[in-house]
């Protein structure tokens, strides 16, 4: 009789009723252990939240040499540039830079190019786009954060619309975003391998797993089971991975590291294409029948519905991609714009307003980080559900 | 962004705002009427809101 009770108490996190029923177990097993998290960790966590805004500001800070009320347009341009720089991926991991001394604080990352042979060199050779990098006789230069092949002098040719016409090598570089994805992967591996291992000792998770176990159960019981149906088990690994991957990366975007991984359309494109591929490959006879020959409607209608349904197959992952990308990017841009308010209204009203707004927006962004991960997982589960659905009831539609 | 783009962006935001606002309002009505169905209503609300939001963002990028 004890075993189901114990498993249940892990889930009781979300339900007040169960919380009351199992209060003695709950208190002993969970609350005590939570109190034991030392104060240093708490302090670090709260500090991280508060500091996330300051790092965005640091990029803009050094431009304040503009005289008061004078060149507003110039400042606007520079702030735009800073925001754009933050949104984009980068070849080096720069935490902040000092424009007066021209120093960048951070570390370089490897650049890996395929251009009739492999070229591997450190991104410090670019000197943040200021110099030409040489590798095995080829010369490369950064222009607007993209690698172009140039001559030894670093000349970049333009067409009429001011787009560079230089050749672009195939780029497999370990950029800032790639590093963050590796870090997230490693973190997830350690966390969830630890969670899985702790079940060998007993039915109760230990350590950080106590926090994540209810979330895993929530995804299984409230996202996968109701939306996919009895075949949910096959899709659980993907759903859990994608949820925690997006969630952790969203949260990393709010830390002072200044990364923007899920706000990069290439990343969300890759995630959406995986959902797309899994959906199509697990689609059964019914799924394809509902696309090309919709049952239960008159024949002329079937011909009209087929192209619409086929289009829908591609629109669904496209919407997934755009939704995650736009939400996260818009969040970062708005947050940074509000912080940039300080530089436009240079008095205590502007500063106070900027602080208060940025603080509350940061809290909303914490919610959005979890919400977008949840929605991506939920919609993926929904699409898998369409693909594996069985229709015992013929002509029920 | 030219003037028509800005006006279009404003119209998109108004439309999306009305749409999501109506979803949220209706969901609250429904929760008030049937508090025991809160979980199901919230899930449905989030799906609908996410779909509208997706279209809104797509339109904003085009404008």
Image (cartoon, coloured by chain):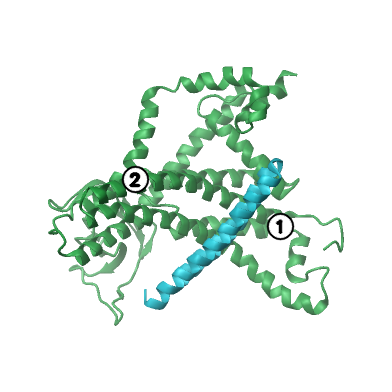
Chain colours: A green, B cyan
Residue A122 position, x and y percent, is 27, 51
Residue B7 position, x and y percent, is 43, 73
- Residue at 30% x, 61% y is A145
- Residue at 55% x, 24% y is A206
Quadrant of image for the N terminus of chain A: top right
> For mark 2, what is the residue?
A356
Foreground: disc 1 or disc 2:
2
- Residue A195 visible in rendering: yes
Image check: B43 left or right of A86? right
Which residue is nearer to you in this view: A154 or A335? A335
In the image, residue A371 above or below residue A12: below
In the image, residue A113 above or below residue A40: below
Residue A174 position, x and y percent, is 37, 52
In the image, residue A397 above or below residue A105: below
> For mark 1, what is the residue?
A387
- Residue at 61% x, 43% y is A237
């Amino acid at each position: 009789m004890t075993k189901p009770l114990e498993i249940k108490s892990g889930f009781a996190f979300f339900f007040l009723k169960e919380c009351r029923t199992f209060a003695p177990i709950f208190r002993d097993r969970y609350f005590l252990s939570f109190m034991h998290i030392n104060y240093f960790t708490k302090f670090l966590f709260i500090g991280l939240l508060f500091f996330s805004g300051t790092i965005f500001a640091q990029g803009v800070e050094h431009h304040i040499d503009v005289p008061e009320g004078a060149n507003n347009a110039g400042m606007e341009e520079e702030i735009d540039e800073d925001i754009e720089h933050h949104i984009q991926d980068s070849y080096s991991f720069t935490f902040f830079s000092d424009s007066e001394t021209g120093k960048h604080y951070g570390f370089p990352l490897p650049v890996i190019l395929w251009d009739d042979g492999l070229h591997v060199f450190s991104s410090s050779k670019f000197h943040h786009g200021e110099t030409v990098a040489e590798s095995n006789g080829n010369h490369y230069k950064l222009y607007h954060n993209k690698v172009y092949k140039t001559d030894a002098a670093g000349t970049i040719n333009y067409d009429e619309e001011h787009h560079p016409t230089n050749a672009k090598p195939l780029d497999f570089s370990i950029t800032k975003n790639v590093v963050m994805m590796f870090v997230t992967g490693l973190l997830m591996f350690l966390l969830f391998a630890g969670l899985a291992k702790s079940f060998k000792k007993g039915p109760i998770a230990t350590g950080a797993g106590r926090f994540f176990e209810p979330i895993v159960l929530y995804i299984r019981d409230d996202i996968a089971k109701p939306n996919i149906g009895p075949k949910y088990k096959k899709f659980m690994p993907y759903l859990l991975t994608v949820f925690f991957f997006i969630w952790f990366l969203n949260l990393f975007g709010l830390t002072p590291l200044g990364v923007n991984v899920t706000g990069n359309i290439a990343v969300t494109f890759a995630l959406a294409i995986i959902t797309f591929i899994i959906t199509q490959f697990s689609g059964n006879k019914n799924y394809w029948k509902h696309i090309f020959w919709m049952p239960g409607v008159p024949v002329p209608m079937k011909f009209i519905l087929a192209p619409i349904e086929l289009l829908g197959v591609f629109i669904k992952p496209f919407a997934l991609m755009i939704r995650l990308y736009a939400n996260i990017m818009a969040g970062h841009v708005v947050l940074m714009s509000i912080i940039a308010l300080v530089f436009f209204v240079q008095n205590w009203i502007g500063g106070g307003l900027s602080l208060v707004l940025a603080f509350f927006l940061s809290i909303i962004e914490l919610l959005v980080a979890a919400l977008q991960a949840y929605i991506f997982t939920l919609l993926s589960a929904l699409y898998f559900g369409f693909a594996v659905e069985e229709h015992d009831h013929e002509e029920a539609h | 962004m030219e003037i028509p783009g800005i006006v279009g962006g404003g119209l998109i935001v108004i439309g999306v705002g009305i749409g999501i606002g109506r979803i949220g309002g209706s969901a609250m009505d429904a929760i008030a009427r049937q508090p025991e169905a809160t979980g199901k209503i919230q899930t449905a609300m989030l799906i609908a809101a996410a779909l509208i939001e997706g279209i809104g963002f797509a339109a904003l990028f085009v404008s």
